[in-house]
Image (cartoon, rainbow, N blue to C red):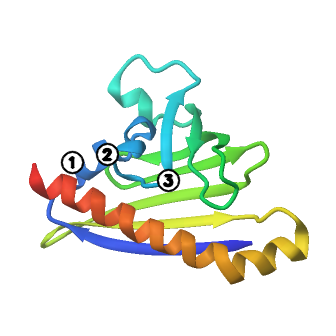
Amino acid sequence: MGRIEKSIIIKASPEKVWEMLAVDRWSEWMEEYKSSKYTSEVNTPEDKYRVGVSAHIIEKDEFLGKPVEFDLEITESLENEKIIAHSKGKMIMTLTYILKSVEEGSELAFVWDYETPWGILGKFLDRLFGEKHVEKHTEKSLEKLKSILEKK
């Protein structure tokens, strides 16, 4: 199982950062996400963070040269503090966002746990190419989020 951990300080309140952690906002700041649509009922802004809410994600994939699609479900949510989503289907992963109030604004920690396909070969390819690629995109995405929130 692979794991990527990154954190960033953002000069914005946890409440402002939290707004951008809604799944339908990911494509605004996550480099690899093309689109995301809720597949469960979302009637209020609060529903976007509710445990059990699901979404269909379309992600760009530079390695395969075609979009990758998967479904996510929110499995844990603590307003303005933590949200965890698990994927369903072919892509097996857990995305965790942890928010803490700090003197400068907010610290956002991101943890991505994932399983690579193709057994030992997949683990080898991930170590060789995938891990660095994902780390680079994660850092760029967090910097983009920081830039968006600090302009507001």
Q: Is residue 136 left or right of residue 14?
A: right
> Which quadrant of the structure image shows residue 14?
bottom left
Q: Where residue 151 sits in the image (x, y, percent)?
A: 10, 54
- Answer with mark 3 or mark 2, whichever residue precedes in sequence: 2
Q: Residues within 10 Å of mark 3 (few under 14, many from 20)?
A: some
User: Residue farthest to the left?
Assistant: 152
User: Residue farthest to the front?
Assistant: 65
Q: Are marks 2 and 1 in contact (CB under 8 Å)?
A: yes
Q: Secondary structure at mark 1?
A: helix
Measuring 57% from the left and 65% from the top, which residue is drawn there? 112
Residue indicated by mark 3: 32
Up-down: is 36 above or below 10?
above
Amino acid under disc 1: Lys
Q: Residues within 10 Å of mark 2 (few under 14, many from 20)?
A: some
Pick the front one: 89 or 69: 69
Of badges 3 and 2, nearer the viewer stands 3
Residue indicated by mark 1: 16
- Answer with mark 3 or mark 1, whichever residue precedes in sequence: 1
Q: Secondary structure at mark 2?
A: helix
> Does residue 13 appear in the picture of this structure?
no
Measuring 36% from the left and 21% from the top, which residue is drawn there? 44
Q: Where residue 53 sits in the image (x, y, percent)?
A: 55, 31
Measuring 31% from the left and 72% from the top, which residue is drawn there? 8
> Does residue 146 appear in the picture of this structure?
yes
Pick the front one: 77 or 38: 38
Q: Where residue 54 sits in the image (x, y, percent)?
A: 59, 32
